[in-house]
Image (cartoon, rainbow, N blue to C red):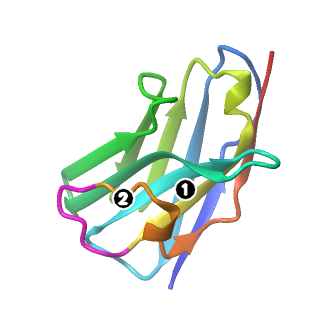
């Protein structure tokens, strides 16, 4: 089992920045992927960003078109933590943000579908005011 705990959400004005963290504990997985999804009230859970790895220092990342150039996903292997740096935030980024983990081997691919992930965190709220 893998446990995921998100942190870093909050209220920020449009144009501001936030950094979300997702700390993994429990089962250790040397290859896999972790991603961020978000869900606004009344909407489906959407892909935001994900990172996969096949070794300690070999990573692959992918982003939703709506966040490319503004968000950056990264991973600290030693801390088993994934970060989502969110810059130039917009009101439409307001949502509950969920961290997810997959323990499968993805090679150079990056899983972007919610069904690709076995483990999920509880979520952290991000609210961007206009």
Secondary structure category for the residue under label 2: loop
Instruction: Look at the image and say whether residue 107 sits in the magenta stretch.
Output: yes
> In the picture provided, is 68 more to the left or to the right than 13?
left
Residue most extreme to the bottom: 1
Q: Residue 112: image x %, image y %? A: 42, 54
Q: Residue at x 56, y 58 (%)?
A: 99
Q: Is residue 111 above or below residue 59?
A: below
**To which residue does mark 1 refer?**
22
Q: Which mark is residue 73?
A: none
Residue most extreme to the front: 43
**To which residue does mark 2 refer?**
111
For the residues labelled 2 and 1, the Cα–Cα distance comes to 17 Å
Q: Residue at x 45, y 31 (%)?
A: 65
- Which stretch did the figure color magenta? 103-109
Q: Is residue 115 above or below residue 92?
A: below
Q: Residue at x 59, y 69 (%)?
A: 120
How many other residues sit within 10 Å of disc 1, few (<14), some (14-19) or many (≥20)? many
Q: Magenta part mainly helix, strand or loop?
A: loop
Residue toward you, 32 or 77 = 32
Point out the image quarter for the C terminus: top right
Instruction: Look at the image and say whether residue 8 sits in the magenta stretch.
Output: no
Q: Is residue 52 above or below residue 101?
A: above
Question: Of discs 2 and 1, which sits in the foreground?
Answer: 2
Q: Residue at x 73, y 42 (%)?
A: 95
């Amino acid at each position: 089992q893998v446990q995921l705990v998100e942190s870093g959400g909050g209220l920020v004005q449009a144009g501001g920045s936030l950094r979300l963290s997702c700390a993994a504990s429990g089962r250790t997985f040397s290859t896999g992927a972790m991603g961020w999804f978000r869900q606004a009230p009344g909407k489906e859970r959407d892909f935001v960003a994900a990172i996969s790895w096949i070794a300690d220092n070999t990573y692959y990342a992918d982003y939703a078109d709506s966040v490319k150039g503004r968000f950056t996903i990264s991973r600290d292997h030693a801390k088993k933590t994934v970060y989502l740096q969110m810059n130039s935030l917009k009101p439409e980024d307001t949502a509950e943000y969920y961290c997810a983990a997959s323990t499968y081997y993805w090679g150079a691919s990056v899983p972007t579908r919610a069904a690709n992930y076995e483990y999920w965190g509880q979520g952290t709220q991000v609210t961007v005011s206009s």
